[in-house]
Structures are given as C-alpha cells and as structure tokens.
C-alpha cells in the first residue's frame, strides 16, 4: 500500500531512471535527476528544523517550483503554492493564515519576495539546491510518515473575504491517482500537458498521475494559450496523449479555431472541468479530433480534485447539457434535499460527497470546516463525514448525475425561482458568443447578462432567448465586454462582476 506520494516518484526512478519525467520551456529532467534534486532541497529544509510545518512557495510555471514541492515533502512538511502573479496583498493574507515555517522563492522573483516583509522566513530555492543529501535524516522522516498527514494546501476564495486553505492528505491524493489510473487505463506511455497553474488543484492530477504511471509531463507556457495554433503545434511536437484542462482553456482553442490547421492526433484523452463546457466547444473538438475520448470531470478542491466523471458516449444536441456522470470507485455521491433526505429520482438536491478523497478541512479555520465537512445526516451510528459542495444536481433518466447550478446561483425574481445557469446555457449556444455570465443585481432586482463576443449583439440575444425561455427568465440588462474577467483559476470572476454592479449603484447615489 502506498502511503506517501514520494513512493510513486522513487518507484518510477528505479524502473525508468533516464526517462524524462518533467519538462518546461528551458529544460528537461529525468526521474533520477528529479529524485536527486528533491532530496537535496529536502535535506536543506530539514536543517531549518520545521518538520511538520507548512512551507509557502512563490510558484512559477517551471521545474524549480515543482522540485521545491517534492523537496518539501521529503522534509516531512507540506507545501502551499502561491502564484507569483497574485497581488502582494493577497499573498500576505495567505501567509498570515498559514504562519509558515519557510517561504521559498526563486532569485528571479526577489522583488516579489521583498514586498512580503517576512525576512526571517524567506529562502531561495537556489540556496537549497546547494545542499548535500542527508540520507539518514530523510530516512527518519519517512519512517515517521502517516498517510493522513497533509501533502499540500490550496487556497480558495472565502465568503468573508479571507481565503480558505484546503488541507489535502497524502492518502487522498493516492486515492485520486489510483482511481484515475484504474478508470482511464493510464500507463508508462502517458504524456501529459499541464495547463493549470500550480496553485490550482487541476495541476495536482497532472503531477501525481505522471509519477504514479512513470509518464512524462510538459509544463505549457501560459503565453501559448493566447496563440492556440502554436499550442496545438506544441502538443503535436511533444506527442502529448492526455490533457486535463479547465473547460475555459478548451473554449479558447475553439474560439480561435486552433484545430483548423494543426490536429495533434496523438491525443487520446481530452478531459475538462471547472465550469460547464458549452456544447459548441465540445462539438468543435470532436469534429477535429474524433479519435480522442472526451471526459467531463466534476469536483471541488475539498474532495481532492474530482469525485465524478462522464465519458462522452453519445451525441448531444447544441442545447443539451453534459452529465457529470457517476462517482469514482471508493467515492459516494449523496444527493440531499432541503430536509437532508435522499432526493427522489429526478429531484434536484445538493451534491454531497463521502469517501477517502475528502480533504482534512480548512487550515486554521474550524468554523468553516465544521460547516462544510459534517456528519452524514442519514445516520448517527458512527463518525461518517461528508462534504457539502453547495452545488445542486439531479439524476437523469439514464441514472447519470447532472449539474444544475450553484446553490447560491438560484434566485427568486418576479415570484419565480430561476437558475442563472439555465440562462447561460441558452446564451452559450449562440455562435457569436465566446462566453457569458449571469449575475443578479439585488439592489435593482434585475438579471444582468455579461457577454463576450466580437461586438454588441443585444437585439439578437433577446430575440433568441425569447424563443427558448419564458419572459421572466430573460435578462433585464445586457453588458457587452471585449473580455470577461477571469480569476487566477481561469473561471469567470463572478465576484468582480457583481462588484462592478455595486459600484454602479454607488455612483448613482
């Protein structure tokens, strides 16, 4: 039984010592080099006497950041990736929540590090790379390891304005990669192309599926996602077999017709998550890469990336919604109604998750942890924790779980209960729409549609929506944007859009 993710790395290193494990735009590293580098970093951290404490990494999309993660784990600590592009005040808030034992950064990011003001805790990765490997100390750390110990912390937004750090254990990540490998038949021939930044849990699948299967992972430069044709060329040149991307990344490729000229035919698995994938985007990819399997993944950070999956096995009309499928092995989905009872067939209920994949909770935040991670309400015979996702769903006639909306995206307008996601689905069908987002203006009691396209199309949108939706569901206001703001995880920034409406209301006074 694997109880430490480093076992995957070391097993791969023993079997394929010279094989390329990870590569970025400037260098490649074999499994032997990764193990050696990580052990050096780990030995250097151990000298600081912070075993069991969190270590913050000012992370970039490169091998140095990735090696620091493994090194921190070798040292018996757990890592907290913080994207170097984040606003410094956001970084400071995260550091305040964590009170880390160390903050690691690369010399090239010294200006960012200096602004944090934590001079007694800051250390460069370059300095740690000069450490000698202390095999005896590393072996002692391994002997004391438990699978329930934290591996990493990923931060999500908090309703109070203070971000929440989701604590994920080794055991939960082991469960994740074992179930993915089992469900999708991954092996040592797998070549992954990492799209997500390292402070976004989508990247966890790329990293740990790579070492579990002794595969190879390429870190794609962020700049390529504004040049889809070069991106496809990159996938083709590196013979990438699997991509596990945010749905928005697939949307960018479709919008700019990135597959029209270059089709990376080595791709056999195209997986996506994060937001509902517009059907026209799926159709575009399928038309150009029909040889690939398409998989819709679902799950919040708190259940270790994904808890359900749907392998696209039939054709869907443009106005249909992809199911999120069924639970992975060793995971159970409970669909609970407002009385905490199992929802009836076809009834919408809150998606709740139980199983080994659950996170340990929120770091240093017992109140939020106890609210989201709670006893299974269906019995009280023993401790049986579930995570309440806040997402609503239902089972269709085929027994597949379908995402309905966020619990907090359901509104009451003109006496009617309305799912904003239903409006978005109909707008996204329109060919001239790149993306859209519906929010509710509570002060003015109006449904507001933000849409991104090549120009203003308010008349056409209303005309099309009136054919599909009752009048009370049609947006009361439409705002054209050349670019809808996205958050650091490449999801539409609903908080920012609502704030824009609030600022307008303030300006009117």
Image (cartoon, rainbow, N blue to C red):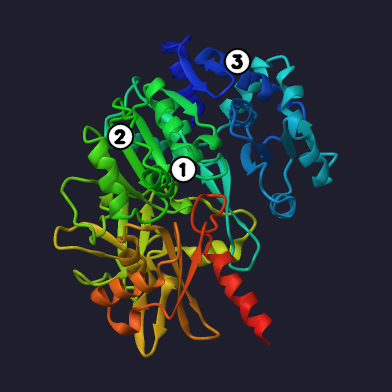
Q: Residue at x 41, y 27 (%)?
A: 233
Q: Residues within 10 Å of mark 2 (few under 14, many from 20)?
A: many
The secondary structure type at the circle numbered 3 is helix
Which residue matches tag 2? 269
Q: Relative to 188, is 225 on the left or the right?
A: right
Where is residue 94? Give x, y as percent.
69, 52
411 on left or right of 51: left
Residue 265 visible in the displayed image: yes
Q: CA distance from mark 2 to mark 3?
A: 31 Å
Quadrant housing the C terminus: bottom right
Q: Work out which quarter of the rendered image holds the N terminus and state it.
A: top left
| Residue 379 position within the rendered picture, expressed as x and y whole percent measured from the top left | 33, 67
* CA–CA distance in space, label 1 to label 2: 15 Å
Marks 2, 3: nearer the viewer: 2
* Dots 3, 1 in contact, CB < 8 A: no
Provide the residue designation for mark 3: 36
The residue identified by callout 1 is: 202
The numbered mark at residue 116 is: none
Front residue (pair 293, 5): 293
Query: Mark 1, residues whose alpha carbon is within 10 Å: few (<14), some, or many (≥20)?
Result: many
Q: Residue at x 31, y 83 (%)?
A: 471
Q: Is residue 124 above or below residue 460?
A: above
Q: Is residue 501 shown left or right of residue 335?
A: right
């Amino acid at each position: 039984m694997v109880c430490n993710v480093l076992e995957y790395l070391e097993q791969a290193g023993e079997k394929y010592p010279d094989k390329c494990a990870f590569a970025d735009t400037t260098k490649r590293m074999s499994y032997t080099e990764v193990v050696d580098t990580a052990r050096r970093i780990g030995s250097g951290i151990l000298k600081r006497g912070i075993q069991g404490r969190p270590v913050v990494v000012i992370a970039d999309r490169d091998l140095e950041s990735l090696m620091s993660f493994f090194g921190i784990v070798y040292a018996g600590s757990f890592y907290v990736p913080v994207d170097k592009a984040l606003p410094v005040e956001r970084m400071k808030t995260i550091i305040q929540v964590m009170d880390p034992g160390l903050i690691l950064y690369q010399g090239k990011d010294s200006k960012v590090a200096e602004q944090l003001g934590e001079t007694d805790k800051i250390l460069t990765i370059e300095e740690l790379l000069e450490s000698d490997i202390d095999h005896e100390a590393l072996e002692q750390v391994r002997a004391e390891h438990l699978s329930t110990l934290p591996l990493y912390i990923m931060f999500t937004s908090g309703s109070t304005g203070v971000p929440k750090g989701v604590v994920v254990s080794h055991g939960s990540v082991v469960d994740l990669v074992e179930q993915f490998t089992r469900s999708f038949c991954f092996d040592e021939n797998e070549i992954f192309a990492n799209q997500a930044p390292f402070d976004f849990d989508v990247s966890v699948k790329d990293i740990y599926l790579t070492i579990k299967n002794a595969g190879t992972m390429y870190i794609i430069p962020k700049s390529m996602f504004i040049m889809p044709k070069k991106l496809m060329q990159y996938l083709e040149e590196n013979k990438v077999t699997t991509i596990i991307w945010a749905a928005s990344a697939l949307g960018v490729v479709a919008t700019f017709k990135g597959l029209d000229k270059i089709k990376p035919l080595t791709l056999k698995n195209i997986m996506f998550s994060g937001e509902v994938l517009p059907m026209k985007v799926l159709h575009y990819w399928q038309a150009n890469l029909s040889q690939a399997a398409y998989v819709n993944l679902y799950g919040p950070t708190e259940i270790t990336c994904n808890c359900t999956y749907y392998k696209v096995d039939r054709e869907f009309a443009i106005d249909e919604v992809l199911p999120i499928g069924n639970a992975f092995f060793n995971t159970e989905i409970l669909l609970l109604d407002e009385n905490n009872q199992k929802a009836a067939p076809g009834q919408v209920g809150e998606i709740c998750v139980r199983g080994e994949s659950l996170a340990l909770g929120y770091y240093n935040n017992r109140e939020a942890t106890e609210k989201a991670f709670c006893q299974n309400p269906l019995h009280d015979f023993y401790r049986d924790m579930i995570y309440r996702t806040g997402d609503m769903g239902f089972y269709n006639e085929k027994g597949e779980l379908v995402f309905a909306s966020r619990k907090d995206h359901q509104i009451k307008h003109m006496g009617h209960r309305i799912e904003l996601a239903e409006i978005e689905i109909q707008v996204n069908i329109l060919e001239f729409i790149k993306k859209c987002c519906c929010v509710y203006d509570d002060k003015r009691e109006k449904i507001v549609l933000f849409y991104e396209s090549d120009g203003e199309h308010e008349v056409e949108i209303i005309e099309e929506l009136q054919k599909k939706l009752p009048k009370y569901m049609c947006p009361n206001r439409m705002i054209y944007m050349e670019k809808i703001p996205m958050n650091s995880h490449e999801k539409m920034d609903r908080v920012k859009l609502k704030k824009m409406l609030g600022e307008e209301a303030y300006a009117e006074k």
